[in-house]
Image (cartoon, helix red, strand yellow):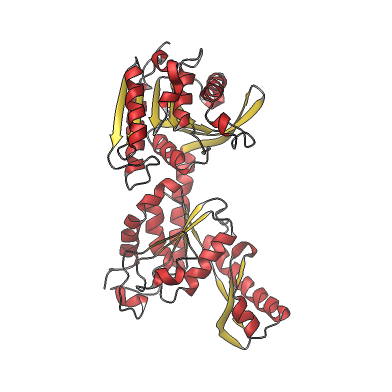
Amino acid sequence: MYFTDRIDAGRRLAAEVAHLRAADPVVVALPRGGVPVAAEVARALGAPLDICVIRKLGVPYQPELGMGAIGEGGTRVINEQIFRSTGVTEKQLAAVEKRERAELERRATRYRRGRPAVDLRGRTVVVVDDGVATGSTALAACRIVRERGASRVVLAVPVAPADWAARLGTEVDELVCPQTPSRFWAIGEFYADFSQTEDAEVVARLDEAAARTEHRSAASAHRELALQVGPVRLTGDLTVPQDATGLVLFAHGSGSSRHSPRNRYVAERLNAAGLATLLFDLLTEEEAPDRRKVFDTGLLGGRLAEATRLVREEPEGKGGLPLGYFGASTGAAAALWAATEPGTEPGAIVSRGGRPDLAGPRLAEVAAPTLLIVGGADPDVLDLNRDARSRLRCESGLQIVPGATHLFEEPGALEAVADLAALWFTRHLGQEPPRT
């Protein structure tokens, strides 16, 4: 056996999916046995926990043979081959679905106790069960969360047969399983305690996770902020922790937006360190595909400067707090450019995998303490940052994250970026901002 119980399995599985934290995921459990496992995964990822209640649509005269499955929100997955080969009519299918949907809704209401299902649209969803045997239930769950709008589906289980990837690999974006024994009879043989999970435990785990999510939300104020910058209206997401000590404006890079999971992850870590964050787009949705504008440092930097002045004038936006810039890729050049504009005067700047060279002659005019963070396995960008630092006349630092590539996707790389940024901002934003 591999696991003491489902909690032990969940903690071990959490270590295997730690790299997904940066994706701001939602963890979805298959009740009932998957819930204790998923609760530990959600806790480790700092993610919301929800359930995927599934009801099999059995052939009317052979109920154990599934011709499909249904999930919440009207989602339905039909096995067309079985449906057509059994001669079931559309009317019979509708009758089976009506009966099973009533039971599905009853169970979902009982488990959630009136809470709405978590919105999965555009999210990375980690589907968790206590194991996979045939894979049919897990497969249905993955298809259903995809139907509900998940942009990326990860199936994570503690144990599965050795050939599970061949069965399920084409249906999901990523498979995670720490134990895949060649001899596999049943999931329970790999647990010392595989006793049945009761409804009461499912409810308790979901209540606990919901309370944890609500506590995080209560500790910080969130709102959408619209800024009229010249002829365009830019939208941002403002998060202000209680007793915030500074405000960091994020300048996103090429091909990115305020929804970037990497920047949102860094923002969450800054929020935990007591810093408010504003993630907003420097280009409108119509402008974003235009590569000329993506690399127009003057345009991006000018908009960031104007947004900074607007934020400083807005009391509800915590404009009175010491202010800093976090720039990624081309957004780093925009941050350095904006820092030299009148009325901005940031107290600190951090660049992640940035292109500070695109700020050109403005580099020598930057007065704010500037930290350049680059991946050790990103040699071209590293050379550009070394050269750019030599042209800075302000306090500066160059931190290399060993083994990290341009997007810092390696295990622990983005955590290192977030920790370095939090340290730099908390160190400098408590000081009087430098004058250009």
Q: Position of residue 287 (x, y in %)?
A: 62, 33
| Residue 99 horizontal/vertical position (percent) | 65, 76
As drawn, is 409 to the left or to the right of 120?
left
Look at the picture and state if 371 lies above or below 104: above
Of residue 79 and residue 123, the one placed in the foreground of this image is 79
Q: Quadrant of the C terminus?
A: top left
**Above or below, comparing residue 104 to residue 435 in the picture:** below
Q: Is residue 127 visible?
A: yes
Residue occupying the point 40% across, 24% down: 349
- Give whichever of 192, 377 is nearer the camera: 377
Quadrant position of the N terminus in the picture? bottom left
Q: Count of labels shown?
A: 0
> Extreme top residue here?
435
Residue 214 drawn at (x, y percent): 48, 46
Q: Residue at x 52, y 29 (%)?
A: 295
- Rendering quarter of residue 425: top left
Q: Residue furthest right?
A: 91
Find residue 246 and report its horizontal and vertical position in percent: 42, 25
Q: Nearer the viewer, residue 352 or 2?
A: 352
Q: Residue at x 27, y 40 (%)?
A: 402
Residue 110 visible at all: no
